[in-house]
Image: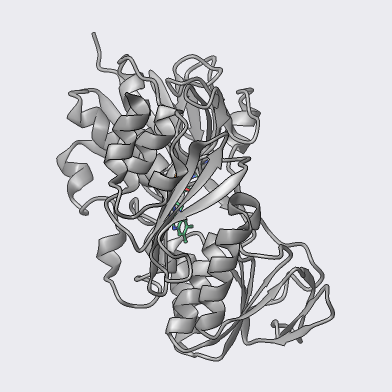
Amino acid sequence: MSKQTFVIVGASLAGAKAAQELREHGFDGRVVLIGAETERPYERPPLTKDYLRGESEREKAYVHAPDYYGQHDIELMTDTTVTAIDPGASRVTLDDGSELSYDRLLLTTGSEPRRITAPGSELDGIYYMRSLADCDALRRRLDDSGRVAVVGAGWIGSEFAASARLLGLEVTVIDPLALPNERIFGAEIGGFYRDVHVRHGVEMLLGQGVEAFEGDGAVARVRTSAGKVVECDFAVVGIGIAPRTGLAADAGLAVNDGIVTNARLETSAPGVFAAGDVASAWHPFYDQQLRVEHWANALNQGPAAARAMLGEDVSYERIPYFFSDQYEVGMEYSGYATSWDQVVFRGERDGGEFVAFWLSDGRVVGGMNVNVWDVNQHVQELIRSRRAVDVAALTDPDTPLDGLVSETTA
Ligand SMILES: Cc1cc2nc3c(=O)[nH]c(=O)nc-3n(C[C@H](O)[C@H](O)[C@H](O)COP(=O)(O)OP(=O)(O)OC[C@H]3O[C@@H](n4cnc5c(N)ncnc54)[C@H](O)[C@@H]3O)c2cc1C
């Protein structure tokens, strides 16, 4: 019998980790990893942090060493875009018109920045941050110092603002919400992050959107909906991302805010899988489709999809997790909380070292540790336990969290 061909579309974290998993699980057929970017797979978190600030080598951002793919017989095709999928014929079409047949297909096409449509948004000097190329362009702008307007106080905007400030630029952040990430975390944590930026000298223009970008050819100022005029040398826009679902939708796969998969990450087309930012996967713990736009999800879901492609019994049900670093503030968040009735703190919020818990009916539905480490796993266990916790013990820094977990699960 001739060997099978497994094709992976999207050569970033999820795709590269899936290819690695196929080999580590003994798959000896063809593995073809196709990516539109000219770079070999790399990780994006450094692009708003150490790499952006020139504190880490480019090499550190890559998922694997340059010779990894050759050594493991993974056919990495960079600078190549898949333009169509034919699930009936089990074939993909590449941008040079050639076709490639597959036995299993994995879609890890990720996501792309949402574009702002305000007047003047086509001016030069307005940047988005997704790729190494975007980051390199912004590094050059940061070298020139000056003033930057950051549109969007989500994670990308906030981390960029922090890095720019650390490099000495004058930074203004503009966001229509009253507080950073208020919709996801509520006022307590939103207020904490606003204060962190203000303390570092960032001008936070909250509760106002962009009315227009203005300038002669290149952006020179941003006019906000509150009538404020922000003079700037350039602007960075981080207003969220959209999953790259076009290829899947054109092929007739079920798409609904992401490529719809079951818990084993298989799409509506048998033999076609999806993972990472682009996948809206059935999450057995939450009993709903969930699309997670974070590093750890790409890291873990790519390999899980690879195991499913190999016919292993897979049910992807990790608790969503992500991290962010801004100035001296490092944090990890676990959970998926759309509603809660209380946010409680273990440690002083204003002291900058704490664990915040989001509670619903006395149960932990989300937890964020800020400058407190090695607790994340316990937070996840508390969430998984689905048991009501004793709030006094939860908020008492002297009561070990792992003890609490065994009490709740007893
Ligand atoms: C600047 C930045 C900082 C971040 N920081 C953090 C952080 O601190 N913490 C955290 O948890 N998460 C962070 N993230 C999010 C994290 O990086 C993403 O969740 C992760 O990159 C998703 O990986 P992915 O492989 O699913 O998709 P992506 O990284 O989006 O990669 C998809 C790849 O598929 C390629 N592709 C798409 N369509 C095609 C096609 N038709 N043919 C060929 N190739 C195609 C794209 O070119 C791209 O290379 C950050 C993201 C960015 C942009």
Residue furthest out toward the left: 71
Image point (71%, 65%), residue name = 178
Q: In which quarter of the image is residue 148?
A: bottom right
Q: In which quarter of the image is residue 298?
A: top left
Which of 87/237 is in front?
237
Which of 56/263 is in front?
263
- Asked whether residue 383 appears in the rendered view, the answer is yes
Determine whether 206 is above or below 319 in the image.
Answer: below
Q: Position of residue 141 (x, y in %)?
A: 51, 83
Q: In which quarter of the image is residue 231?
A: bottom right
Image point (24%, 23%), residue name = 29
Quarter of the picture holding the C terminus = top left
Residue furthest out toward the top: 1
Quarter of the picture holding the N terminus = top left
Determine whether 137 is above or below 16 in the image.
Answer: below
Q: Position of residue 332 (x, y in %)?
A: 40, 54
Determine whether 157 is above or below 233 in the image.
Answer: above
- Asked whether residue 96 appears in the rendered view, the answer is no
Image point (45%, 66%), residue name = 133
Q: Position of residue 244 (x, y in %)?
A: 58, 42
Q: Where is residue 120 in the image (x, y as percent from the top left)?
A: 78, 73
Which of 100/352 is in front?
352
Question: Could you tell whether 238 is left or right of 65 in the image?
Answer: right
Image point (27%, 38%), residue name = 403
Question: Could you tell whether 176 is left or right of 24 in the image?
Answer: right
